[in-house]
Image (cartoon, rainbow, N blue to C red):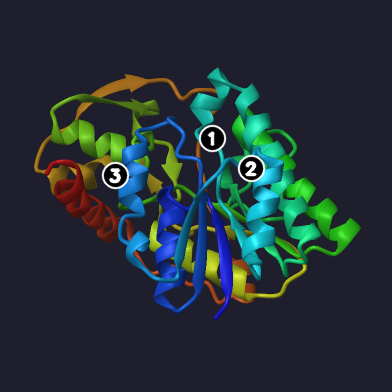
C-alpha cells in the first residue's frame, strides 16, 4: 500500500483525487486549510465520505506554513505528493494579486522543499492552461512560449513550474507539472463558470456572456483530469510539463445551450466584451499526455454537464 499526500485535498479536484486513490487501495493524507475564499462547509462536504475511509487522514494546515508542511511529510512519509492547493481564478487574481505570490509560489516552494528533505519519490504540481495566454497558435503544445501571462494567477503558476524545474535540476526531485484545461463537474467551485451559469440559469438570473459567446474553451471533466493526475503520480518521468485537457474546444454559446436544455430554462444573457485577462480560446494538444501517461479523456461535454446538473439538483438545491 502506497501513501500519497494530496494538498488541497478538500477542494474540487483534490477531493475527487483523494476518492480515486482510496478506491484503488492507497493510503491518502489530505491537507487543506479550509480558507473562506468560498464557503468552507462545501469543502467539508467534499471530503465527508473520505473521512469514513480507514485509509484517509485529513490534516488541517496551510501550505504557507513551512514547519507544518515539513512535519506532515516527515510524519506520514508519502511516496509522492499531488500538489493541488492554490489560489485559483484569473479574475480574482487581477483584483488581489499579492495573495497569489504568497499562496501559490511560497506554498509550492514549501511543498517542494519538504519533499526534497524527506526523500519523496516525486511531486505532481497542478498548473493551468491559462499559462499560454493569448496566442494564435492552436492547439496549445507544452513547448509553446508561456512568458506573457494575462494575469497574476497564471504568472504564479509559471513560477511554480520553474521552481519545480529548479528542484529537479538542483536536487533530482522528479516533478511533473500538469496543466489543467477548464475543469468542471460535481463539487465545482461556486466561482467557476459551469457552476455559475448552471445556478444562474436554473434560478432565472442573468449570465454574462463575452463577445457574443464566440470564445471557445477546452472543457475537461473532472474524472478525466483525475485519471491524468493519477497516471502522473504512477509514472517516473523526471521533470515534465504535460497538458491535461479534452482537446475539443466548445464555443461558449453552445456550452450555454447545453445547460439551457438540461435546466429547461432559457438563459438571460448580458453581453460584454472579453476582458484583457481572458484568452479567446483554450485548446489542449494532449498527444504528450497520451504518449507518456496513456491519457484518454472519456467524458463528452454534454455528458459531463448532465452529471454536473444531476449533482447540482441533489447537493445544492436539496
Q: CA distance from mark 1 to mark 3?
A: 18 Å
Q: Earlier in the sequence, mark 1 or mark 2?
A: 2
Snapshot quadrant of residue 273: top left
Q: Residue at x 30, y 34 (%)?
A: 196
Q: Which residue is mark 1?
A: 279
User: Is residue 210 placed above or below 110 in the rendered structure?
Assistant: above
User: Is residue 242 placed above or below 219 in the rendered structure?
Assistant: below
Q: Which residue is mark 3?
A: 254
In-image side of 50 versus 98 (left or right):
left
Q: Residue 21, percent across and down?
A: 46, 70
> Dot 3: what SS?
helix
Q: Earlier in the sequence, mark 3 or mark 2?
A: 2
Q: Residue at x 70, y 44 (%)?
A: 67
Q: CA distance from mark 1 to mark 2?
A: 9 Å
User: Is residue 274 placed above or below 125 in the rendered structure?
Assistant: above
> Dot 1: what SS?
loop
Q: Residue 108, percent across and down?
A: 69, 45
What number is the disc on residue 132?
A: 2
In-image side of 227 versus 111 (left or right):
left
Q: Is residue 187 visible?
A: no
Q: Badge 1: how crowded within 10 Å, few (<14), some, or many (20+)?
A: some
Q: Residue at x 67, y 53 (%)?
A: 71
Snapshot quadrant of residue 48: bottom left
> Dot 2: what SS?
helix
Q: Which residue occupies the foreground of this view, 69 or 261?
A: 69
Q: Residue at x 26, y 57 (%)?
A: 302
In-image side of 291 versus 33 (left or right):
right
Q: Is residue 277 visible?
A: yes
Circle 1/circle 2 CB separation < 8 Å:
yes
Amino acid at each position: 500500500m502506497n501513501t500519497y499526500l494530496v494538498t488541497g485535498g478538500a477542494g474540487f479536484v483534490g477531493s475527487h483525487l483523494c476518492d480515486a486513490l482510496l478506491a484503488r487501495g492507497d493510503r491518502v493524507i489530505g491537507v487543506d486549510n479550509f480558507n473562506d475564499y468560498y464557503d468552507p462547509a462545501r469543502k467539508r462536504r467534499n471530503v465527508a465520505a473520505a473521512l469514513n475511509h480507514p485509509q484517509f487522514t485529513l490534516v488541517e494546515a496551510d501550505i504557507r506554513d513551512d514547519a507544518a508542511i515539513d512535519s506532515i511529510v516527515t510524519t506520514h512519509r508519502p511516496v509522492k505528493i499531488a500538489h493541488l492547493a492554490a489560489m485559483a481564478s484569473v479574475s480574482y487574481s487581477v483584483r488581489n494579486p499579492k495573495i497569489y505570490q504568497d499562496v501559490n509560489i511560497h506554498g509550492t516552494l514549501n511543498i517542494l522543499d519538504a519533499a526534497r528533505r524527506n526523500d519523496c519519490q516525486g511531486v505532481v504540481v497542478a498548473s493551468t492552461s491559462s499559462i499560454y495566454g493569448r496566442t494564435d497558435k492552436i492547439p496549445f503544445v507544452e513547448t509553446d512560449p508561456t512568458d506573457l501571462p494575462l494575469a497574476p494567477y497564471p504568472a504564479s503558476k509559471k513560477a511554480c513550474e520553474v521552481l519545480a524545474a529548479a528542484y529537479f535540476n538542483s536536487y533530482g526531485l522528479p516533478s511533473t507539472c500538469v496543466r489543467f484545461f477548464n475543469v468542471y463537474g460535481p463539487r465545482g467551485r461556486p466561482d467557476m463558470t459551469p457552476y455559475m451559469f448552471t445556478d444562474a440559469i436554473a434560478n432565472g438570473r442573468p449570465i454574462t456572456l463575452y463577445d457574443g459567446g464566440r470564445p471557445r474553451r477546452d472543457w475537461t471533466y473532472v474524472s478525466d483530469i483525475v485519471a491524468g493526475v493519477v497516471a502522473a503520480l504512477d509514472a517516473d518521468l523526471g521533470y515534465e510539463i504535460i497538458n491535461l485537457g479534452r482537446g475539443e474546444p466548445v464555443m461558449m454559446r453552445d456550452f450555454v445551450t447545453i445547460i439551457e436544455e438540461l435546466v429547461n430554462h432559457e438563459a438571460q444573457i448580458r453581453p460584454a466584451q472579453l476582458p484583457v485577462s481572458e484568452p479567446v480560446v483554450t485548446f489542449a494538444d494532449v498527444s504528450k499526455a497520451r504518449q507518456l501517461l496513456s491519457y484518454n479523456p472519456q467524458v463528452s461535454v454534454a455528458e459531463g454537464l448532465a452529471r454536473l446538473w444531476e449533482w447540482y439538483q441533489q447537493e445544492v438545491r436539496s
